[in-house]
Amino acid sequence: MSSLPLVAPPARSFRGLPRSRLASLTVHAFGAAPCGRGSDHLLSAKQLSRGDLETVLDRAAEIAADPGAVADAHGDRLLGLCFFEPSTRTKMSFDAAMKRLGGDTVDMGSVESTSVTKGESLADTVRVVAGYADALVLRHPSEGSATLASEFVDVPVLNGGDGAGQHPTQTLLDLYTIRENAGFQDLTVGIMGDLKYGRTVHSLSHALTNVDATQHFVSPESLRLPRSVRFDLHEAGAQVREHTDVDEVLETLDILYVTRIQRERFPDENEYRKVAGEYRIDAGLLDGVDDDLTVMHPLPRVDEIAPDVDETTHATYFEQARNGVPVRMALLDLML
Amino acid sequence: MTDPELRVSKIEDGTVIDHISGGQALNVLAILGIDGSGGVAVSVGINVPSDRLGGKDIVKVEGRELSQNEVDVLSLIAPAATINIIRDFEVAEKHRVSRPGEVTGVLSCPNANCITTEAEPIDSHFEVLGEGVRCRYCDTIIRESIADHISVA
Ligand SMILES: Nc1ncnc2c1ncn2[C@@H]1O[C@H](COP(=O)(O)OP(=O)(O)OP(=O)(O)O)[C@@H](O)[C@H]1O
Ligand SMILES: [Mg+2]
Ligand SMILES: [Zn+2]
């Protein structure tokens, strides 16, 4: 492993490093990003064209088939982990991905242990961490946090979830899982649960417009897709079909993507229990459906998928979680 | 005085915002951050008869010109407005407003969970849509009553 210079190189030299593979992503997608300032950030799934998706997923498949080939690919690179909210999967899989590329991570630690508790702004925190790392992954409870961060640093920012906004790297692993299990041809996807606050839903639904998927959105009235997401889907030429009952669409689906309905979204416990009970799936519900139906979930699940579904051929959520590593390796490999 | 629009005394230097859509004058004052406490001399005409607009509002501010950010938001709530810069009692410049592609500052994002509502060193920033505006940071769309989101400084 080559030694690191003691003085950080000026920001521009980062962009001067060999980046042949990044070029396709930067020029065609991230460079044309409507948000951010035209740098190689991944802030929103809205940035990703069909070509970008295929590039990342193809690279992920290559890496999954032969992880040894990239084991030393990024030995001199450090990824900064800035998680202002608890995270298990996203943080651990980025950590694993970076290390499996031969690189390493530096971790801000939990918010309680940082200068954030002293009132430091996000803009300051990311500027400092950007001085220690070659790219940043940011998870933050406020919508727009990743976009803000991208305006203050010269290294790529990867949005690891911004409030109820976006979660584009989750979307990439979701799409990888969908492509492996159902393919993109004539795809019909049902997305169920908390569509209002679910950032994985906002990212995924937009990305699915790239493959012309038919999408059905299933949720209680109070948790339907927000106006801004419906607006974008319409702009992308997608039809938004909304339902309150999954039975209306279950038989037509290739993919059922289930998300968690959170207790804190409801004024009282009774209301929550009633709604959560209606948006729960179990083996009995899936009894009559086609064997090919793939059931996905970004995890963690609580009650919305009964444990008896795990034993069925439909259950794909643990495979989905596992795909987080090769997909994030592919993304880092292309962006670093 | 024969000019019915000059019911109060003439201003020497300042700005006359004319042809404001009827009923929007108080919102225009809000955009300018004028609530009467700053000691600026202001006169306001509400529902003044007008050939072009039927009824219009007019705002005259002594000793003050508008920033581009203020003009941009003004154009969203008063698309027919004319901005007259007064120097030495005369109209020195006259500008029509035009719909901008984006607006910075002045408006605040209605999404309480938006990063722009935190203590960060950034201004709000909205993309102007065919109808309404949209927060660059959190994507929230404001379509109805944009004036309700003028930030009180
Ligand atoms: N010194 C001044 N003090 C206060 N108001 C003024 C002064 N000079 C002009 N105005 C007002 O500014 C507006 C524009 O003045 P102007 O003389 O250009 O009128 P106009 O020809 O009717 O313009 P427009 O074609 O834009 O309606 C009018 O409402 C006028 O009453
Ligand atoms: Mg006139
Ligand atoms: Zn916002």
Image: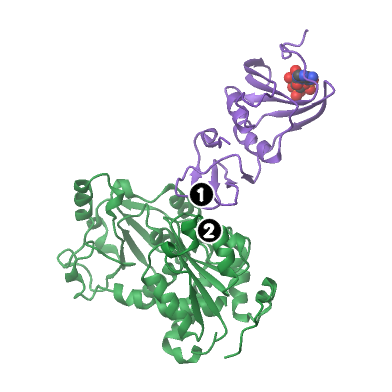
Q: Is residue A198 left or right of residue B114?
A: left
x and y percent of residue A255 in the render? 32, 67
Which quarter of the image is occupied by the N terminus of chain B?
top right
Instruction: Give the chain letter for purple.
Output: B
**What residue is drawn where x is 46% and y is 58%?**
A117
Q: Residue furthest top?
A: B1
Badge 2: few (under 14), some or many (20 or more) residues near its Cα, within 10 Å?
Answer: many
Image spot of residue B73 (x, y percent):
62, 37
Marks 1 and 2, Cα distance to the nearest angstrom?
Answer: 9 Å
Q: Evaluate whether residue A232 shows in this view.
A: yes
- Of A61 and A249, which appears nearest the observer? A61
Q: Which chain is green?
A: A
**Three-letter amino acid code at the position of disc 1:** Glu
In depth, the one of A6 and B149 nearer the eye is A6
Up the image or down, A39 lies above or below A98; here it is above
Residue shown at the point (38%, 77%) measured from the top left? A323
| Circle 1/circle 2 CB separation < 8 Å | yes
Of residue B140 and residue B9, the one placed in the foreground of this image is B9
Q: Residue at x 59, y 32 (%)?
A: B77
Quick one: SS at disc 1? loop
Q: Is residue A65 above or below residue A306?
A: below
- Percent of width and height locating residue A155: 60, 70
Amino acid type, mark 2: Leu
Residue A122 is marked as 2
Q: Chain of mark 1?
A: B
- Residue located at (16% from left, 70% from top): A308
Query: Can you give x and y, in whole percent of width and height, for residue A79 in the image?
Result: 52, 75
- Disc sitting over residue B118 in the figure: 1
Rendering quarter of residue B10: top right
